[in-house]
Image: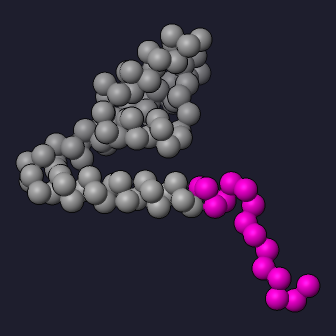
C-alpha cells in the first residue's frame, strides 16, 4: 500500500519517550546543580562513582552471584544516590531473593 505509514513496534515508542524523559530530568538537574557551582562537581563525581559501582557489581557477578541489570531505574538510583544507592539496590535484591 502506497502512502500507508507503518506504526512503530510496541517498545520503540516507549523507549524513545523514556530517553527524552531521562534527558529532560538530566537537563533540569544539571541546570539546578550549575546554579550552585560547588554542588555541580560534587554531584557529577557522585553520579560517576555510582555508575562505576553498578558496573563493578555486574562485572563481579560471576564471582559473587549478585547481578543488577542496567536499566533506567538502577541507572537513576546509582546516578542520583551514588555508591550508597548501589549498596541499597544490592540489599533490596538480596532481601527479595
Q: Is residue 52 visible?
A: no
Q: Looking at the figure, which quarter contains the C terminus?
A: top right
Q: Is residue 59 above or below residue 17?
A: above
In x, y percent, where is residue 65? Answer: 58, 16
Q: Which residues are magenta?
A: 1-15
The reply, left or right, for residue 10 in relation to residue 49 is: right
Residue sitting at x 38%, y 21%: 87
The reply, left or right, for residue 53 in relation to residue 11 is: left
| Displayed quadrant of residue 28 | bottom left
Q: Is residue 42 above or below residue 3?
A: above
Q: Is residue 3 within the magenta segment?
A: yes
Which one is nearer the viewer's eye here, 13 or 81?
13
Q: Does the magenta stretch mainly form a helix, a strand or a loop?
A: loop
Which one is nearer the viewer's eye here, 90 or 96?
96
Which one is nearer the viewer's eye here, 77 or 61?
77
Q: Is residue 21 above or below residue 8?
A: above
Q: Is residue 74 within the magenta segment?
A: no
Residue sitting at x 43%, y 32%: 54
Q: Is residue 54 above or below residue 15?
A: above
Residue sitting at x 82%, y 88%: 3
The reply, left or right, for residue 60 in relation to residue 53 is: right
Amino acid at each position: 500500500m502506497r502512502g500507508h505509514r507503518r506504526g512503530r513496534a510496541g517498545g520503540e515508542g516507549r523507549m524513545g519517550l523514556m530517553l527524552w524523559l531521562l534527558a529532560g530530568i538530566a537537563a533540569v538537574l544539571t541546570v539546578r546543580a550549575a546554579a550552585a557551582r560547588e554542588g555541580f562537581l560534587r554531584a557529577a563525581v557522585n553520579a560517576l562513582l555510582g555508575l562505576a559501582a553498578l558496573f563493578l557489581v555486574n562485572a563481579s557477578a560471576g564471582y559473587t552471584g549478585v547481578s543488577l541489570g542496567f536499566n533506567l531505574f538502577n541507572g537513576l538510583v546509582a546516578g542520583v544516590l551514588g555508591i550508597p544507592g548501589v549498596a541499597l539496590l544490592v540489599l533490596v535484591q538480596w532481601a527479595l531473593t
